[in-house]
Image (cartoon, coloured by chain):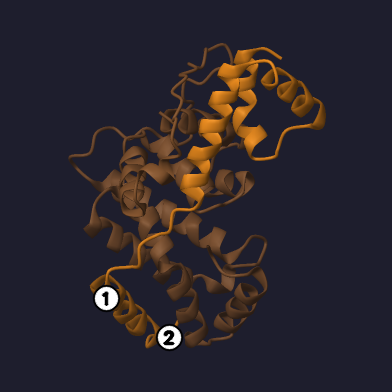
Chain colours: A brown, B orange
């Protein structure tokens, strides 16, 4: 989980004042989170590495524009999400990308299926840590991109609902709606 | 509150973002509905598994290339 707010704020101020070491510390703290996010969106290690580098380079170039209205990490995630989506759009062979701001058919009058899969044993007792992580990764990967991204940001990167909405450029109700559906799909 | 409404409110309930009167209504339903209790419980466990998942360390070569790219950036004027 990203660093405590106070120390993050101090590091950002130092970096903005030209302290390269402070910025490198921020990079070390967040690099694996950003890489995981990029890999989840692009599903390609080479593209994910490009996104990782571009995100931190852009963050460094635009440090002076960071006002502190949000956490630095939230701002960084927003940059990474944009970079990853641009990467997807550039792929010639990619199928038509559903725009994140397109309405997904999750209208109020649609019935949400209630699958009553009871798990019985606690999965953490049934599976080892590595197995559980693999099952988890596979389950998330199977989600469509709009749902995958909401789960990534909200449940794994632990952004707030409002931060997730800002990072994805969608409304708070859209985040909540997609998150509900994603969580119900994942529990199966 | 009926079962369909419980499912609609489920995510916000588990995130602690539901209003007090809706929480009361939802929990009253749960006290009487075994099926909904299963759904709430398994969804809660799903979220806990995600929240507790640790990200793997960055592969060393990826980290090295990132540091190199940053060093090159630092050496140029902004």
Please tell me whether residue A169 is drawn above or below residue A101 in the rendered image.
below
Same-chain check, marks 2 and 1: yes
Q: Secondary structure at mark 2?
A: loop
Crowding near pointer 2: few (<14 within 10 Å), some, many (20+)?
few
Mark 2 lies on residue: B77
Point 43% across, 85% down: residue: B77
Query: Is A97 placed above or below A18 here?
Result: above
Percent position (x, y) of residue A48? 30, 57
Residue A51 is left or right of residue A24, and the answer is: left
**Residue shown at 60% from the left, 32% from the top:** B11
Q: Is residue A113 left or right of residue A72?
A: left
- Name the residue tied to disc 1: B65
Question: Which residue shows up at 64% across the image and 74% down it?
Answer: A9
Chain ID of residue with mark 1: B
Give the label on residue B41, or none.
none
Image coordinates of residue A83 in percent, x first then y, are 38, 55
- Tell me if mark 1 has few (under 14), some (14-19) or many (20+) residues whose alpha carbon lies within 10 angstroms of its own: few
Residue reaching furthest left?
Answer: A93
Q: Quadrant of residue B38?
A: top right
**From this viewpoint, is residue A86 visible?**
no
The residue closer to the viewer here, A9 or B76, is A9
Is tag 2's residue or tag 1's residue first in the polypeptide sequence? 1
**Residue lying at 35% horizontally and 67% vertically, measured from the top left:** B57
């Amino acid at each position: 989980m990203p660093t405590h707010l106070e120390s993050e704020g101090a590091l950002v101020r130092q970096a903005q004042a030209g302290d390269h070491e402070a910025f490198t510390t921020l990079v070390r703290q967040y690099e694996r989170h950003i890489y995981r996010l990029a890999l989840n969106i692009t599903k390609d290690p080479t593209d994910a590495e490009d996104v990782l580098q571009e995100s931190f380079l852009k963050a460094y170039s635009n440090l002076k524009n960071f006002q502190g209205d949000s956490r630095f990490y939230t701002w960084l995630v927003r940059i990474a999400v944009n970079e990853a989506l641009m990467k997807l759009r550039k792929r010639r062979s990619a199928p038509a990308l559903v725009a994140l701001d397109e309405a997904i058919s999750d209208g109020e009058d649609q019935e949400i299926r209630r699958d009553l899969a009871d798990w019985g044993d606690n999965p953490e007792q049934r599976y080892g840590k590595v197995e559980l992580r693999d099952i988890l990764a596979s389950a998330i990967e199977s989600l469509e991109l709009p749902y995958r991204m909401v789960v990534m940001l909200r449940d794994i990167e632990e952004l707030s609902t409002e931060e997730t909405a800002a990072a994805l450029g969608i409304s708070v109700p859209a985040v909540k709606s997609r998150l509900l559906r994603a969580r119900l799909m994942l529990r199966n | 509150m009926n079962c369909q409404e419980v499912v609609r409110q489920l995510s916000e309930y588990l995130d602690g973002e539901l209003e007090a009167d809706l929480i009361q209504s939802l929990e009253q339903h749960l006290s009487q509905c075994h099926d909904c209790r299963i759904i709430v419980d398994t969804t809660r466990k799903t979220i806990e598994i995600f929240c507790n998942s640790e990200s793997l360390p960055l592969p060393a070569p990826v980290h090295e290339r990132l540091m190199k790219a940053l060093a090159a950036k630092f050496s140029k004027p902004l």
